[in-house]
């Protein structure tokens, strides 16, 4: 394998998938420490990739195809030695080809004809493997097999932690005291555990003195938080829309535990080593569960799960999530909080 001086990594979306790709960056840097790595990503996620250790340049693009095509001339001027396409779609494969990189690698089972654009194809032996391990197949094919446990490396910037501390102080709380993060939203409607169940968990945690509970989410998810406030009898710290995306690693690294639907913040929490209690319905814990040890995943056992569908056609509707009992979530949180108290 020749020495790679300039590498283009194409992984534009989504939030969870971007987190899953971080160990590829770590592996490539271990293989070629002097390599300059450029990560092409959708603009909405660029601030998070800016915090990825080992990424030398973040190349943001907009969603429109013309934005991608408009990058071709300037990308070619970068004279990349290697293009790594982890997205595996026509647009990403074509951009790898148009970048001018003489070596282009992607998955054999890439969609929309993307394999046509690669010079090296990486087979995926089974669909039943975690996305992190699947992406690392590409690194291994390049001779960049990680040494030991896959590494998710975020830059924990002092400025980000200062922002987080300030937000907590303005809410009358402390980021350095034990607290529970709760993420009640998800991009797919079928991934959302009932808000009434989250409210029961919140009330029980408050009753047991296990908190405070800090509800996180983007500004687009404020409606869910407002509904939760109606359903719960207990106070909570509302950080919905208050924390910049780039500060999420710093924020979630300070949580004692994260209770969450299958979502991007779930993967960030797992990446920074915070214990996760994840509520899974239509998606596969094997493929996209919180990566690593110390996490607890709950899911209802129904024949059609995982269905990978954004529309539930099962009767009763969304039974896979409704079968998850709030008491089980509270007990999982209690065990993790108790274990952390004992270890201190």
Image (cartoon, rainbow, N blue to C red):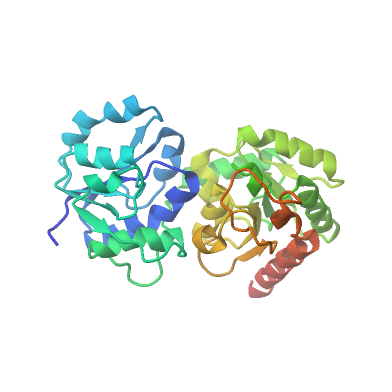
**Rendered image quadrant of residue 306:** bottom right
Position of residue 268 measured from the top left corner of the image (x, y, whole percent): 52, 52
Q: Is residue 252 left or right of residue 59?
A: right
Position of residue 62 measured from the top left corner of the image (x, y, whole percent): 39, 29
In the image, residue 337 above or below residue 180: below
Identify which residue, 321 or 304, lies in the foreground.
304
Identify which residue, 64 or 80, lies in the foreground.
64
Identify which residue, 313 or 161, lies in the foreground.
313
Q: Is residue 162 left or right of residue 322?
A: left
Identify which residue, 12 or 242, lies in the foreground.
12
Q: Is residue 302 left or right of residue 270?
A: right
Position of residue 174 measured from the top left corner of the image (x, y, whole percent): 67, 49
- Taking the spot 68% from the left edge, 38% from the top edge, the residue there is 170
Q: Is residue 56 visible?
A: no
- Taking the spot 73% from the left edge, 54% from the top edge, the residue there is 319
In the image, residue 268 above or below residue 339: above
From the image, which quarter does the N terminus lie in?
A: bottom left
**Rendered image quadrant of residue 205:** bottom right
Position of residue 91 measured from the top left corner of the image (x, y, whole percent): 32, 37
- Taking the spot 60% from the left edge, 37% from the top edge, the residue there is 218
In the image, residue 259 above or below residue 57: below
From the image, which quarter does the C terminus lie in?
A: bottom right
Q: Is residue 64 left or right of residue 228?
A: left
Q: Is residue 319 visible?
A: yes
């Amino acid at each position: 394998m020749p020495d790679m001086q300039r590498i283009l990594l194409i992984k534009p979306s989504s939030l969870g998938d971007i987190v899953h790709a971080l160990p590829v960056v770590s592996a490539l840097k271990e293989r070629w420490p002097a390599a300059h790595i450029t990560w092409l990503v959708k603009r909405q996620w660029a601030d998070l990739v800016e915090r990825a250790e080992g990424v030398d340049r973040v190349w943001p693009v907009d969603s429109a195809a013309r934005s991608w095509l408009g990058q071709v001339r300037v990308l070619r001027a970068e004279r990349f030695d290697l293009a790594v396409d982890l997205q595996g779609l026509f647009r990403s494969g074509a951009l790898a080809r148009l970048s001018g990189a003489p070596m282009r690698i992607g998955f054999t089972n890439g969609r929309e004809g993307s394999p046509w654009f690669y010079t090296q194809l990486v087979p995926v032996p089974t669909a039943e493997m975690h996305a992190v391990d699947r992406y690392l197949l590409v690194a291994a094919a390049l001779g960049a097999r990680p040494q030991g446990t896959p590494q998710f490396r975020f830059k924990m910037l002092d400025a980000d932690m200062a922002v987080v501390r300030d937000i907590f102080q303005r809410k009358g709380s402390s980021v350095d005291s034990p607290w529970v993060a709760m993420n009640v939203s998800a991009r797919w409607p079928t991934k959302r555990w009932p808000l009434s169940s989250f409210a029961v968990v919140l009330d029980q945690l408050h009753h047991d003195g296990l908190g405070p509970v800090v509800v996180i989410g983007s500004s687009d998810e404020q409606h869910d938080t407002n509904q939760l406030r109606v359903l719960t009898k207990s106070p909570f710290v509302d950080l919905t829309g208050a924390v910049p995306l780039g500060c999420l690693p710093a924020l979630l690294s300070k949580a004692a535990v994260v209770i969450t639907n299958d979502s991007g913040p779930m993967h960030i929490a797992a990446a920074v080593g915070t214990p996760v209690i994840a509520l899974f319905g239509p998606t596969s814990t094997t493929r996209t569960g919180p990566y690593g040890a110390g996490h607890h995943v709950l899911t209802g056992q129904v024949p059609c799960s995982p269905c990978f569908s954004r529309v539930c056609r099962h009767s009763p509707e969304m039974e896979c999530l409704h079968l998850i009992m709030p008491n089980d979530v509270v007990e999982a949180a209690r065990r993790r909080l108790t274990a952390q108290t004992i270890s201190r």
